[in-house]
Every structure is written in structure tokens, then in C-alpha cells.
Amino acid sequence: MTRDWVYVDELAEHVGDTVALKGWVYQKRSSGKIRFLVLRDGSGLLQCVAGVKDVPPETFEALDRVTLESSVVIRGTVRKDDRAPGGFELGLTHFTILHQAAEYPVQPKEHGVEFLFDNRHLYLRSRTPHAILRIRNEVVQGCRDFFYQRNFVLIDSPILTPNACEGTSTLFETPYFDATAYLTQSGQLYLEPACMAFGRVYCFGPTFRAEKSKTRRHLTEFWMIEPEVAFLELPGLLELAEEFISYIVGRALDRCKEELKVVERDTGLLEKVLPPFPRITYAEASRILTAPEAQAKMREAGAPAFAEGNDFGGFDETVLTQKFERPVMVTHWPAEIKAFYMQPDPADPSKALCVDVLAPEGYGEIIGGSQRIHDHDLLLARIREHNLPVEAFQWYLDIRKYGTVPHSGFGMGIERCVTWITGISHLREAIPYPRQINRIYP
């Protein structure tokens, strides 16, 4: 790409050179006959300095007049300066305002959460969301690289589907010509036929849950990455999940050092995320949660008491993970509270061969996965037990007729993973434009 300017993240190659940069005014201040301006261009921040004798009078006047977030072109000499943001400084000689911005609403002061998210389209320019979304970008690229390097094939599952994946209560319904369609809850069902064609596959895309939830762990639209592997059973799936999580965390630690500093993340905790992860069964987790110590914590927090046989609530997950410094894998859940497609444990059919991976520090479930039912008649029986329309799942049943094999997969929500890695408190900060029960603007 031919261009007549450089980016801030390229300045190490231009120390001593006179260069042009294009961007927006992030900060400005004056000190007597010197003007300081911080430019941001998306790749980094650059402090620019101009003395009254270094530039023409009209340029000095423009430096006084320019407003925050105005778009500008600057020119000057690059100097190494470890005290400056980004480690470089520009001795400014030329300055042109491309567009003088109106008074910018997001100021360096305390704003309420609703104000910031009503102005999310502008708030993205601020330092903290900028750092979080750069970490998200690295996590997403790391996910793709992990599977590409292991010869997985990307399969784009449809977003519009004729049926539910995990029950009908959390589906968004939409007209589809003369029929009804639903926004997908997961790409998994369409991956299973693909893994019979390619062996190792994954999908990555938006998913939708119509849960009327206002907790910090829920969004109505989120992005999920889901691998599926033929001939893989639960033990191999656990190894794949812990290898995947360790790779993603290590990648963020390696490539997002500055961004993790911006969000003030304790990276020492992330450095402990190495395989093998602790593994406990649902029964063992239940014993932990029903112990007097755990029950006392729940009463103190005003959280509902856990009862064996139930799914975990957010506080239950927090209590469980307090005992571990790495993600913990909870396996062999009661089949009756899990999805219809999960393979029963041959040793105890009341349990499913499945796993929930819970992040430490109280961040909850980041991965859910299982071995899938590969027997046609058993799957048909489970579909009927769950009162799902058999005709809508006929194609899904078909793959159990033609060379069926054991196969397994999991799903990881990108936002939950990013929330944990960055150490932030709410999923809404881990996606550019959050969609929640009470938010669809902007």
C-alpha cells in the first residue's frame, strides 16, 4: 500500500527522520511558549512538541485553536524519548487541521456507565476500551491461528436456522418468507456433518440467546468459536480445550503487554494458566458446594443455596474456582440438565460425557463441550424426550446413518474469554457494540 505518511507503531524505524503522520488529537496542553499535543492514529500515541519559534505564527495559533478529536496531519522530526507515551516524541514543524471537531462529549472525567455506552461509537476512542478491543483482536486471531496450524478447516455455519440447538426458550424468532426461522444459538449442529467430511473443523461467528438476563456474564449477541473433531472422545476433548486456552492466554501475554498494563491486569495470575488443568466431576463439585463452608459463603453473599442436581449459578462457579489458580474442568454432569445431543457415560447413563471449563478469579464458564451421541436410535429418542420436532432434525439424524463415529467438540464465547484475560468486570466491555436485554443502541 503506497502512502505518504507513517504510523506511530512504525516510528522505531524513523528515529532522526522527518516524517508525516495522520490522526486525531487525543490530548493537548500548553506551557508558556511551548505547545504539547498527543496524536493518536489507531496504532499508538505520539507526543508532539512545538515551540513558538519552531513553527510559523499561523501554525502556533492552530495548535491553540484545535479541539480534541479533530483530525490532523502533522510533520516533524522523530526523537527517542522513553518518558513520552510510546517511547517517541515528534519535534513538530508543520500542522494542518483536516476537520475541526465539535466539543467532544467523552471527556477525561467520570462518566456514568449508561452515558459511556450510549456514546459507545465515540467511547471506543478512549484508552481503556481501545486496549480491551486490541486484546480481543489478538484473542480472535489467536483462535484462528491455533486451529489453522492444526489443520482444522473453517466451516461457516448458518446464522438463520429452522430449529433450536439447545432448547426453544432462548431463541430469537424471525419471519423467513412463508416460514419461521431462528437466530442461531450455536454453529455446532452444522459442524457435526462437516467433521464427518473433513475430520477436524471449526466455526466462528455471532450467536444469539434471548435470555432475559441482566447479569454481568450475559449478552444477547456474542461471538463463539467451536471446534468439532471426528473420532475424538471426552479425554481427548479435555486435552484439546486446555491446550487451546493455554495457547490463547500465552498469546495475549506475549503480544498485548502494553494493553494489559492499560487495563491494570495482574498478569502473574495469567502466567499460571498452563496445562494440565485440574479436573473434577460434577459430583465432586457438588460436594464442595454443599459443604458448610461454601453454604455459609452463599448465605453471606445473599446467593441461593446450591442443590445437587441443579446447574451452577454465577456465585456457585465463583466459590468453586476460589480453590484453583488455573481453569478447572467439571465433567460428567447429570444428563437431564444438559443438551439432548450429549453422549451418556456408558458406566452411568445418568451422566453425560461433557465438560464445563470454569475460569479462575470468579469469571465463570468459558468453555462448554461434550462428546456427541453417535447412535441414531439413541439420538432420536433424546430428540423426542426433549419434545423437539423430529422432521426439523432429520438431516442431523442422517449423519448417524452413514459411517457414524464418536465425535466431540466445544464452544468458547470470545467475550467471556476476553473479560477474564483483561480482568474487567462486565462482558459488555469485551465487544465493540454490546447487545443486552435493555440495549440495542448504538
Image (cartoon, grey):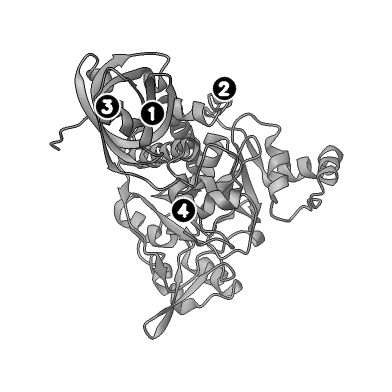
Circle nearer the N terminus (3, 1): 1
The amino acid marked with disc number 3 is Pro
Mark 4 lies on residue: 433
Q: Which residue is mark 1?
A: 38
Separation (CA) of disc 2 from disc 1: 31 Å
Q: Secondary structure at mark 2?
A: helix
Q: Nearer the viewer, mark 2 or mark 3?
A: 3
Residue hosting label 3: 57
- Tag 3–tag 4 contact (CB < 8 Å): no
Q: Give the mark nearer the N terminus: 3 vs 4.
A: 3
Q: Which residue is mark 2?
A: 268
Q: Is residue 233 left or right of residue 76?
A: right
Name the amino acid type tagged 2: Gly
SS class, disc 3: helix
The three-letter code of the residue at mark 1 reads Val
- Judge depth for marks 2 and 4 and give the one in front: 4
Q: Nearer the viewer, mark 2 or mark 1?
A: 1
Q: How far is mark 2 from mark 4, CA to CA? A: 30 Å
Q: Mark 3 to mark 4: distance in Å?
A: 43 Å
Q: Residue at x 61, y 45 (%)?
A: 331
